[in-house]
Amino acid sequence: QVQLVESGGGLVQAGGSLRLSCAGSGRTLSIYAVGWFRQAPGKEREFVAAISWSGPSTYYADSVKGRFTISRDNAKNTVYLQMNNLKPEDTAVYYCAAVRAVAVGTLQRSSSYSYWGQGTQVTVSA
């Protein structure tokens, strides 16, 4: 089992940047695929980005391509989400999640993940 803790959220103006961190404990994150999801008030949780356990290979929602970058530092047992050119519609609680032995085509589905962090708030003002 792996435990996940998100950090790095905050309040920024439109066009600004934040870097979110997802720190793992209990087991190494290097053997897990890790995804980032977000949920705004009154909306369903949506896929943001994912990184595979090997390669690594990365995947992004169309809404964040060219603005967000997911990366992994195995020595620190941490996955990052660098968010640039933030927009008000990026405002949400951001969650990281982990899973083993998942097909690439399912990485965008919340139901594919076994372990979840508690979330970190990102607020972007216009």
Image: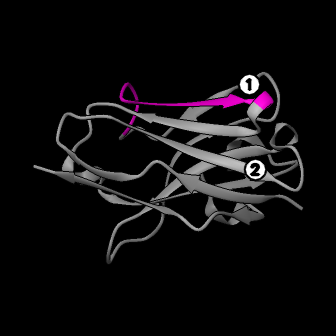
Magenta stretch contains residue 44: no
- Between disc 1 and disc 2, the foreground one is 2
Say which quarter of the image contains residue 111: bottom right
Residue located beneath label 1 in the image: 56
Residue located beneath label 2 in the image: 24
Residue 70 vs 119, above or below: the answer is above
Position of 107 with respect to 42 (left or right) is: right
Residue found at the very far left of the displayed protein: 126
The residue located at (57%, 55%) in the rendering is 6
Say which quarter of the image contains residue 75: top right
Q: Nearer the viewer, residue 34 or 72?
A: 72
Tell me the magenta residue range: 64-75
Q: Nearer the viewer, residue 74 or 103?
A: 74
The residue located at (78%, 21%) in the rendering is 55
- Which circle's residue, 1 or 2, is located before the other in the chain? 2
Q: Residues within 10 Å of mark 2 (few under 14, many from 20)?
A: many
Residue found at the very far top of the displayed protein: 55
Position of 121 with respect to 47 (left or right) is: left
Residue 30 vs 37, above or below: the answer is above
Q: Residue 99, position in %: x, y?
A: 79, 53
Q: Residues within 10 Å of mark 1 (few under 14, many from 20)?
A: few
Residue 51 vs 2, above or below: the answer is above
Magenta stretch contains residue 68: yes
